[in-house]
Amino acid sequence: MHHNRPNSIMFVPRLILPPFTALLFSNMTISAFIASIEQELQEADHCAFTPETVLRDLPNWSSMLALLLIARIDELYGVPISASDFASVRSLNDLFLLVKGHQVA
Amino acid sequence: MNWAQLRHVRIEGIAASVPAQIAYNKDCELIPEKERDLYIRSTGIASRRVASPNTCTSDLCVHAAQNLMDKLGWAATDIRIIVFVTQTPDHITPATAAIMQHRLGCTTDCAAFDINLGCSGYVYGLWTITSLLQGMPDGTKALLLAGDISTACISPEDRSTVPLFSDAGSATAIVKDASVDNPLHFALNTNGQAKEVIWIPEGGYRNPFNQDSLNMTVLGQGIARRPVDLILNGIDVYQHAAQHWPQQVTDLVHQTQTDLGKIDHAVFHQANRVINEMVRKRVGLTESQTESSLNDLGNSGTASIPVTIAYNLRKSLCEKENLLLLSGFGVGLSWATVISNFSAMKHVLWLEFAE
């Protein structure tokens, strides 16, 4: 996208990354990860969430919540998750590992 | 960045026309009752406009164009270019622009064609007409007609599309004026690799309409559709939009050395609140700079930018010159942004189409 910029008048910086992206995700614990998406999870159920919590089993789980969760994770960690990646996510731990894998890559 | 800089055109007016019939998402039975409140809060869409089965996109666009031309004192016989941007033409063939050339009463001295684009299409249409006018005499008049009746190309039993889409048509009156020195800056991008993120599988010539094309398949709770219905993968739209849309806008802002704080109004395609807020925040625009019509008018596809202009800005665009940022992202996938100082328009009209 940045090749052949005609009449380029100045250096065009990439977008400034979302605030949390700069954090080393590898140091983040799963409990901190769950806490960071607590607001969205609360829409699905008012319970204590664990790494084993299965998203689709939550009483108020919906496709809209999936989108909200994906948008929140993208905002916090700079990781936009695709539909096929998300389809393989069952538990919160799966989601944690998916985000972690994307960040390393 | 793929960009263009063009001058010598003036937008005299914009009109949007929506069907009078309103559908409310609080009554949408495809969404379980307990989820509706979250759905409305998240998408930002409370109500939508729905065309009757007898109304086509051309009816809404002709309504908008006739009213606008009337106010501007434009004679149909003076129109030399009609560009129609839509996902929902009246027929597969011929071009709906030709049908509207006749309906509007234009002479045969008129170039008219369709562009098959959606949410990015209004900006592509502005770029096309502005480019075409460069080689035409001063004073040449052109109409950009942009609209969709998306409610006609989706399954009525699909919760992933029904509560989002709204119908609308629009007309933008553009004139060649060599004395206008304000440039329009465009950025234009495409990614056809992601063509199946928003698409209709059957009914064209790759996968022709066949005896099974009207078979409804249940794909989940609240999601059943036929192969001729629009598929919209909301998560993948978000993913692609997050990766590319704010970047294009930011690149054009830097390229043009635009001071974000000086933008009077930013009008993005109205996708849904989740996507629109993501773009607004990443580009760095304030809420008060950024226009939204999602609550009342949902996602009106190709028409959503002129619809939002006509609904929110019909007064301010006529009062003074405005630095505007207009930007759309969607089907193709295709995305486009324009930044320009638009001189005060003569008329911006908001219309309801009585069916």
Image: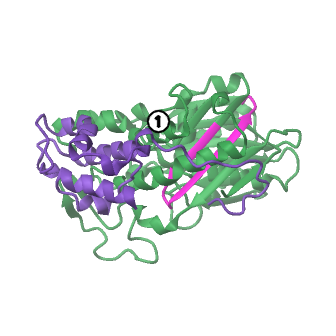
Chain colours: A purple, B green
Quarter location, residue A76 = top left
Q: Residue B206 magenta-drawn?
A: no
Place of residue B133 in the rendered image (x, y in percent of width and height, measured from the top left) = 80, 52
* SS at circle 1: loop
Residue closest to the eye, B274 or A47: A47
The image position of residue B95, as x and y in percent, is 59, 63
Nearer the observer, B293 or B137: B293
Task: Determine whether, in the image, residue B76 is placed left or right of residue A69.
Answer: right
Q: Quadrant of the C terminus of chain B?
A: top left
Residue B249 in view (yes/no): yes
Q: Is residue B35 left or right of residue B294?
A: left
Q: In this view, does A105 lie above or below A41?
A: below
Picture residue at 16% right of the left edge, 36% below the top:
B34
User: Could you tell whether B152 is left or right of A2 in the image?
Assistant: left
Q: What residue is at 49 percent from the left and 42 percent from the top?
A: B279
The chain under label 1 reads B
Q: Where residue B17 sits in the image (x, y, percent)?
A: 53, 38
Q: Name the residue under label 1.
A: B354
Quadrant assignment, res B345: top right
Residue at (35%, 55%) from the top-left corner?
Answer: A81
Quadrant (top left/top right/bottom left/bottom right) for the N terminus of chain B: bottom right
Of residues B299 and B71, the one drawn nearer to the viewer in this rendering: B299
Instruction: Tell me: residue A29, above or below residue B220.
Output: above
Q: Is residue B167 left or right of residue B106?
A: left
Badge 1 crowding class, 10 Å Cα cut-off, few under 14, some 14 to 19, many 20 or more, is: few
Q: What stretch is highlighted in magenta?
A: B325-345
Q: Please name the residue shown 38% across and 69% down the image.
A: B201
**Principal secondary structure, stretch drawn in magenta:** strand
Question: Percent position (x, y) of residue B341?
Answer: 73, 35
